[in-house]
Image (tube, helix red, strand yellow):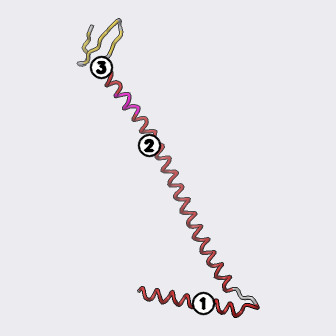
């Protein structure tokens, strides 16, 4: 026996409704679309979580870079202070190092003046 319901034919055999091939294909398609939407939502949440991790890591990297730059400045200052350290027996060496530093600064000033 065939029944017509909204232009769709169902075949009724022993009180069971059997869908036609196009209806089965449509049902399968709907199921797959629902599965894809669920997977999309899962991936979207995962992407948001990963984006948060990336942002946290970028912030951490920036903080570490700032610390590294500060430590480098501290190290350069320490080197400079060691160069200027004057001991009783090394007064002439300290004067020579200071004169070299002054020449280096003068060279830098001259280079900067030429660039302008």
Mark 2 vs mark 1, CA separation in Å: 62 Å
Region in magenta: 29-35
| Mark with earlier residue (3, 2) | 3
Horizontal placement of 46 versus 72: left or right?
A: left
Q: Is residue 11 magenta?
A: no
Residue highlighted by disc 1? 100
Q: Residue at x 56, y 91 (%)?
A: 103
Q: Nearer the viewer, residue 70 or 105?
A: 105
Please provide percent x and percent y for residue 66. Answer: 56, 67
Decide: is 86 above or below 56. below
**Residue 58 in the image, given as x and y percentages of width and height:** 52, 58
On residue 44, the disc is 2
Residue named by callout 3: 21
**Badge nearest the viewer, 2 or 1:** 1
Could you tell me which secondary element the residue under label 3 belongs to? helix
User: What residue is shown at x 76% (from left), y 91% (from top)?
Assistant: 89
Mark 1, secondary structure of its residue: helix
Residue 31 magenta-highlighted: yes
The quadrant of the image that shows the N terminus is top left
In the displayed structure, would residue 6 be above or below residue 61?
A: above
Residue 105 quadrant: bottom right
Find the distance from the CA under tag 3 to the CA under tag 2. 34 Å
Question: Callout 2: few (<14), some (14-19), or many (20+) C-alpha neighbours within 10 Å?
Answer: few
Mark 1 crowdedness (10 Å alpha carbons): few <14, some 14-19, many ≥20: few
Nearest to N terminus: mark 2 or mark 1: 2
């Amino acid at each position: 026996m065939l029944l017509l319901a909204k232009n769709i034919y169902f075949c009724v055999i022993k009180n069971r409704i059997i869908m036609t091939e196009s209806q089965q294909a449509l049902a399968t398609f709907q199921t797959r679309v629902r599965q894809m939407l669920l997977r999309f939502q899962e991936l979207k949440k995962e992407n948001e979580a990963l984006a948060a991790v990336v942002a946290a890591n970028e912030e951490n990297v920036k903080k570490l870079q700032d610390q590294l730059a500060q430590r480098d400045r501290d190290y350069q200052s320490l080197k400079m202070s060691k160069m200027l350290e004057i001991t009783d027996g090394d007064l002439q060496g300290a004067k020579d190092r200071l004169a070299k530093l002054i020449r280096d600064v003068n060279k830098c000033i001259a280079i900067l003046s030429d660039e302008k």
